Amino acid sequence: ASRQKSMLGSSHYMERQVEFAGMLSDDEDQNPDFHNWNKVKIRYCDGASFSGNVKDELQNGTKFFFRGQRIWEAVMDELLVKGLRHAKQAFLTGCSAGGLATYIHCDGFRALLPKDSRVKCLADGGFFLDVEDISKQRTLRAFYSDVVRLQGSEEEVFALQFKHGSRPVLLSS
């Protein structure tokens, strides 16, 4: 609930524009490989990398709507209307939870674009390993299992795991 009124929980509190630099720069000298590509950077906002799709609101003293998948789809629809649907080259990226969103949505992003377009997806962080920590516990598994259940992200997580040959373990008890 504390994030709900911050840039970590609502785009209302984020900067309206962010200047791209490095691999996202439009400057050919600074970014010879991707300077003229269409670029989409996924920012952290919804707590589940834009994969949540809960039907009803959650009320626990305040109202929460875990519908990040719907937000993702609405943003993509808007970008397609603004010209992304004609992109010959498109670059999807994000960091931390935005990086995880890049993993989750890369194939779907690709599917939105013309078949002959070149698409690259780069997660700058957001690789959360399901391994034992120093205390011999799978802390991230427990944490993300709760996030997946709360956000209703099972379908997206399972699809990603199966596609890449993993067993779906995130929701196991």
Image (tube, grey):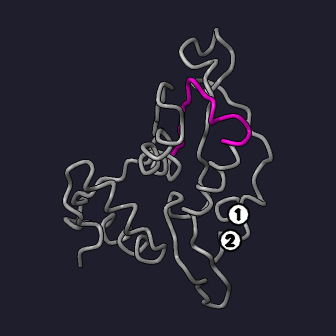
The picture quadrant where one finds residue 32 is: top right
Residue 28 numbered tag: none
Report which residue position mark 1 lands on. Answer: 10
Q: Total label count?
A: 2
In what quadrant of the picture does the C terminus appear?
bottom left
- Which residue type does callout 1 highlight? Ser
Residue type indicated by callout 2: Gln
Q: Residue at x 23, y 68 (%)?
A: 137
Q: Please name the residue shown 19% across and 65% down the image.
A: 136
In the image, is residue 32 above or below residue 50? above
As helix, strand or loop, the secondary structure at mark 1 comes to: loop
As rendered, which of 162 and 122 lies closer to the eye? 162
Neighbor class of circle 1 (other Cα within 10 Å; few <14, some 14-19, many 20+) is some
Q: Is residue 9 left or right of residue 102?
A: right
Residue 132: % across, % down:
21, 60
Instruction: List the residue tagged with mark 2.
Output: 4
How far separated are the C-alphas under marks 1 and 2? 6 Å
Task: Give the residue at x 20% y 54%.
Answer: 166
Q: Is residue 151 above or below residue 99?
A: below
